[in-house]
Image: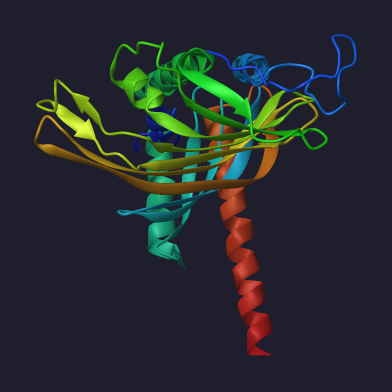
């Protein structure tokens, strides 16, 4: 079973206060367009909610379109208590043929009956989630935040830049601290909608002897509300380059978009997930056959 942490690892590569100042006519009167809280305090609350949301027991099924320098895949994915399970539907712009669909069926069947593979995937998934949570906790500490303009209704646009007073420790913290960009948040619900940034400087490891990540790398993360209480990441786009240990070139040039989110019943097993994926495959194939027949008429 291929590693399922790519989406989360990509986010890891991506991922203190300056109050908004305004002249006031008196110590009592406050202009109505001045935000009620500082940009930093709003971001702190947003990050708290994002981390709290990640702890809830909720699983989803969705369509995933993955584009990188090596792959161009469309997958259907189901989240379970044992980690995510996916089935490839298209590769390099073409639907899987009958032989490829059979191979996917065999791969999935082998996986759900392999406790060792399941444990490895689940451990990797949980480890990625924990590392990502640790990185997100750094954001209110590592950056200075300013409103780019007065919030428009529920939406607030906030710029961020490295806080020179923050001293990062570890590779991930150093990369995160080099970012500068923009956050769009729902100020009423205090949830993150979009985060875009660029590496504002080259990051060297071991004075460059152990490697580096180049200046100018970009990223975007977009979140969407999928239920009354739940938000999911529906876009991650990363473009960074560098070299590690003078041997391995780092080239994260990928985009993953997720859509058609549907809640998965509590207690869904891996076997249940496989059946759900098989049903989607059958429906997709049938829809293509109907479409092809209609075009021939």
Res. 172 visible in picture: yes
In the depicted view, which residue is nearer to us: 229 or 206? 206
Q: Quadrant of residue 25?
A: top right
Residue at 49%, 12% (x, y): give it: 141
Specify whether 67 is left or right of 232: left
Residue at 37%, 27% (x, y): give it: 178
Q: Residue furthest bottom?
A: 297
Tell me where residue 213 appears, x and y as whole percent: 25, 34
Q: Quadrant of residue 130?
A: top left
In the depicted view, which residue is nearer to us: 216 or 95? 216
Check the image and report above or below for 21 versus 70: above
Residue at 39%, 36% (x, y): give it: 6
Residue at 41%, 43% (x, y): give it: 218
Res. 113 visible in picture: no
Tell me where residue 125 appears, x and y as whole percent: 43, 24
Tell me where residue 110 appears, x and y as whole percent: 37, 37
Specify whether 227 is left or right of 165: right
In the depicted view, which residue is nearer to us: 71 or 241? 241
Color encoding of the figure? rainbow
Tell me where residue 144 appears, x and y as whole percent: 52, 20
Specify whether 29 is left or right of 229: right
In the depicted view, which residue is nearer to us: 96 or 43? 43
The N terminus, quarter of image: top left
The C terminus, quarter of image: bottom right
């Amino acid at each position: 079973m291929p590693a399922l942490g790519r989406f989360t690892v990509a986010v890891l590569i991506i991922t203190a206060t300056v109050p908004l100042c305004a002249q006031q006519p008196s110590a009592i009167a406050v202009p109505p367009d001045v935000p009620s809280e500082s940009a930093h305090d709003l971001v702190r609350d947003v990050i708290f909610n994002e981390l709290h949301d990640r702890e809830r027991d909720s699983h989803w099924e969705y369509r995933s379109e993955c584009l990188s320098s090596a792959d161009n895949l469309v997958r259907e994915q189901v989240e379970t208590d044992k980690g995510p399970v996916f089935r490839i539907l298209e590769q390099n712009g073409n639907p899987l043929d009958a032989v490829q669909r059979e191979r996917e069926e065999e791969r999935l069947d082998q996986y759900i009956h392999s406790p060792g593979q399941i444990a490895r995937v689940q451990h990797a998934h949980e480890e990625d989630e924990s590392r990502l949570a640790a990185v997100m906790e750094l954001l209110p500490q590592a950056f200075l935040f300013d409103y780019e303009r007065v919030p428009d209704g529920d939406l607030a646009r906030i710029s961020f830049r490295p806080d020179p007073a923050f001293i990062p420790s570890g590779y991930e913290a150093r990369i995160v601290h080099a970012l500068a960009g923009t956050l769009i948040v729902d100020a009423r619900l205090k949830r993150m909608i979009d985060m875009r940034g660029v590496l504002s400087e080259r990051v060297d490891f071991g004075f460059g002897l152990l490697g580096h990540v180049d200046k100018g790398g970009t990223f975007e993360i977009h979140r969407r509300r999928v239920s009354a209480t739940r938000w999911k990441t529906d876009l991650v786009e990363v473009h960074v380059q560098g070299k590690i240990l003078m041997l391995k070139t780092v080239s994260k040039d990928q985009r993953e978009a997720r859509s058609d989110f549907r809640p998965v019943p509590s207690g869904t097993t891996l076997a249940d997930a496989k059946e759900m994926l098989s049903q989607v495959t059958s429906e997709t194939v049938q829809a293509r056959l109907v479409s092809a027949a209609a075009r021939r008429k």
